[in-house]
Amino acid sequence: MEIKGAVALVTGGANGLGLAIATFLSEQGAHVVVGDLDEDALSGLGGEFDHHVLDVTCPDNVTKVVNDIVKKHGRIDILVNNAGVIFNEPLVNIMNPEGMIHDYTRFRNSIAVNLDSVFLMTGAVVEHMIKGRTKGCIVNISSISARGNEGQTAYSAAKSGVNAMTVTWSKELGRMGIRCNAIAPGFINTGSTNSALTETTINHIVANTPVRRLGEAKEVAQAVVSVISNDFINGTILEVNGGITI
Ligand SMILES: NC(=O)c1ccc[n+]([C@@H]2O[C@H](COP(=O)([O-])OP(=O)(O)OC[C@H]3O[C@@H](n4cnc5c(N)ncnc54)[C@H](O)[C@@H]3O)[C@@H](O)[C@H]2O)c1
């Protein structure tokens, strides 16, 4: 797909990886629209991107924002499902006898923001792609945790579900000219990584990563652009992790 001139919606694009993806797509000539819950960060973007307050877990809000974007820009060619929240909680915490087992509400909340959101956003955008005969591209931001990561029951389950939906949609939508791929970042040098992990854990990760460093947000953005640009890449889960396996 030609990125220059394409209309790209990046969810969670006001911070972190989403902002890096939005910026890189814009540098390649895309018309970038950012949807995010964080109103302060959105206003900090200034006039760089068209932006909308969006809660990717709320079906009515998703439909309204997607309809508004299509009304304004005519279509959406690229959807990057990036919005998500890293969440750590093991199934069993023996240090907390009162609440030893993973809280169910927190499990559901993590699934809502990391998995349901991708379902809701993709359904709303693909409906317009099909009706407008747009040869579009969906890119889901998964995670290395989709392999199953100790201490991340809900987050791992959600990202594994994202991978499964990616492959399923690549098969269902390919014949309509819509491709679907995922990027599975490993440990990236972002604010969310640095607040989710201790310095000791980060040092351990770096020591066990063949390239001996965390990834950079721009390297994830470059992977997003690669799968969009190459029209024969479909149904791929592209790992961007410096060679680490967990
Ligand atoms: N940082 C990493 O190392 C890493 C590694 C693997 C995967 N990921 C994935 O990359 C994506 C971005 O992560 P990040 O590290 O940049 O996190 P981040 O917290 O810096 O950014 C996430 C963005 O999503 C937005 N968001 C959260 N809930 C939302 C909602 N309900 N509706 C709309 N927007 C919402 C936040 O406001 C924020 O702008 C996530 O899906 C995360 O799971 C990150």
Image (spheres, rainbow, N blue to C red):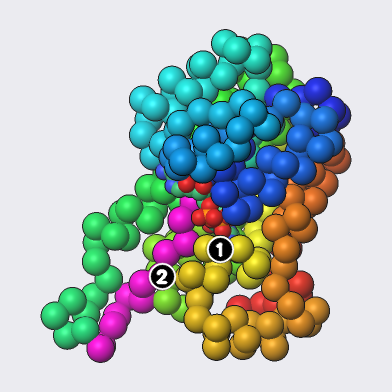
Q: Is residue 74 above or below residue 55?
A: above
Look at the numbered disc 2 and give the secondary structure of its residue. loop
- From the top left corner, tell me how far across and down residue 136 is, in percent: 71, 27
Amino acid marked by disc 2? Asn
- From the top left corner, tell me how far across and down residue 135 is, in percent: 74, 23
Look at the numbered disc 1 and give the secondary structure of its residue. helix
Q: Main secondary structure of the magenta part?
A: loop
Residue at 65% from the left image edge and 23% from the top image edge: 76
Which sits in the foreground, 235 or 117? 117
Mark 1 lies within 8 Å of ligand 1 (Cβ measured): yes
Residue at 48% from the left image edge and 71% from the top image edge: 196
- From the top left corner, tell me how far across and down residue 230 is, in percent: 85, 40
Residue at 69% from the left image edge and 49% from the top image edge: 20
Quarter of the picture holding the N terminus: top right
Q: Quadrant of residue 206?
A: bottom right
Which sits in the foreground, 151 or 167? 151
Left or right: 146 as drawn, with respect to 107: right
Indicate which disc residue 88 carries.
Answer: 2
Extreme left residue here?
A: 98
Which sits in the foreground, 130 or 93? 93
Left or right: 104 as drawn, with respect to 58: left
Between tags 1 and 2, which lies in front? Answer: 1
Residue at 63% from the left image edge and 82% from the top image edge: 205
The magenta segment is 82-95
Left or right: 65 as drawn, with respect to 16: left
Which sits in the foreground, 30 or 48? 48
Crowding around mark 1 (Cα neighbors within 10 Å: few <14, some 14 to 19, many 20+) is few
Tell whether position 221 is magenta. no
Residue at image mark 1: 191
Q: Is residue 17 above or below residue 239?
A: above
Quarter of the picture holding the C terminus: bottom right
Answer yes or no: is residue 107 visible.
yes
